Image (cartoon, rainbow, N blue to C red):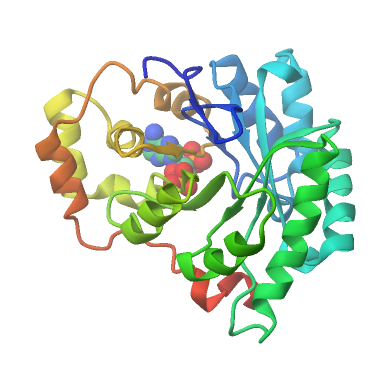
Amino acid sequence: MNKLTDTRTLTNGVKIPVVGFGTWQSPDGEIARDAVRCALEAGYRHVDTAAAYGNEESVGEGIRLSGVKREDIFLTTKHWITDRGYEKTLAACEASLKRLGTDYIDLYLIHWPCVEKISPDWAEINLSTWRGFEKLYRDGKIRAIGVSNFLPKQLEPLLKEAEIPPMVNQIEFHPGYTQPETAAWSREHGMLVEAWSPLGCGTVLGDPTVNEIAAAHGKTAAHVCIRYALQKDAVPLPKSVTPSRIVDNANVFDFALTDEEIARLDAMPKTGYSGFYPDDAPADAL
Ligand code: A2P
């Protein structure tokens, strides 16, 4: 792990760059477009968006403006809760492809699970969405498929029936909130763990432990958070719309956290937690 373009390998052999560029809360229009373009010019080759972020068109535009070839970029988008079920999933993917202006997606994720609180048929509903994912994968529209914000209890029934198992689980993960059980379970079942909000939406950056460790290395708190995810075998997806931060956040390959520092970060009290807990299906309540 020496540079942004180094990769990890998913169970189907597809390679995914070790750091992705996050776009959650990047406003649609020139802000998201210029951020993506800036990230690609700075050397990122992995971009993460979602239908629900409302910025897929701008992300697509940023990619084209960067001049980086599409095949050199790993592009993730996510399926939204209003599109659950087989037919709607197929249509949702087409709509994302159109908005992004591309004819394939590298990684497509179910953004949030359907859960018991929402419907007694939650497991069937998730499976029916997944059947759509399997079809899109077999049709070559998607190079890899996975989930986001799933707990083991929501993954269990899906894995029993899946013909193609999920390759990724993207979860909230940062110092102060790492969901160790979900991360371990996902890995045991073949999924790569991706870290959304690796900076805790920015709030972890003021934490004294994170800053002490940063000072010891002459690095920033953001570097420590991104490096923490990398060393914990998660793929961090730091978001920024600020060019200087986009560029600087990539400088995480010239230092390493010690085991003791990792242990201190592991032991941090719950900090920077978004409040989005999968089992409560907060997204369904939006
Ligand atoms: P901005 O986009 O205005 O630059 P996360 O990736 O955990 O969701 O965190 C994203 C938040 O962290 C955004 O508010 C972003 O602000 C902020 N951020 C990203 N990089 C840095 C940095 N290097 N220093 C301070 N804040 C940062």
Q: Is residue 210 left or right of residue 92?
A: left
Residue at (81, 66) in percent of width and height: 85
Pick the front one: 76 or 157 = 157
Badge count? 0
Name the quadrant of the C terminus: bottom right
In percent of the image, x 18 and y 23: which residue is there?
A: 218
Image-quarter location of ligand 1: top left
Examine the image and state in which quarter residue 123 appears.
Answer: bottom right
Q: Which of 125 and 172 is in front in this view?
A: 125
Q: Residue at x 69, y 52 (%)?
A: 163
Q: Residue 14: horizontal and vertical position, in percent?
A: 61, 28
Q: Quadrant of residue 126?
A: bottom right
Q: Residue 114 location in percent, x, y?
A: 64, 72
Residue 21, picture quadrant: top right
Q: In which quarter of the image is the N terminus?
A: top left
Q: What residue is at 46 percent from the left and 24 percent from the top?
A: 244
Q: In this view, does 100 lie to the left or right of 158?
A: right
Residue 179, horizontal then vertical, whole percent: 35, 59
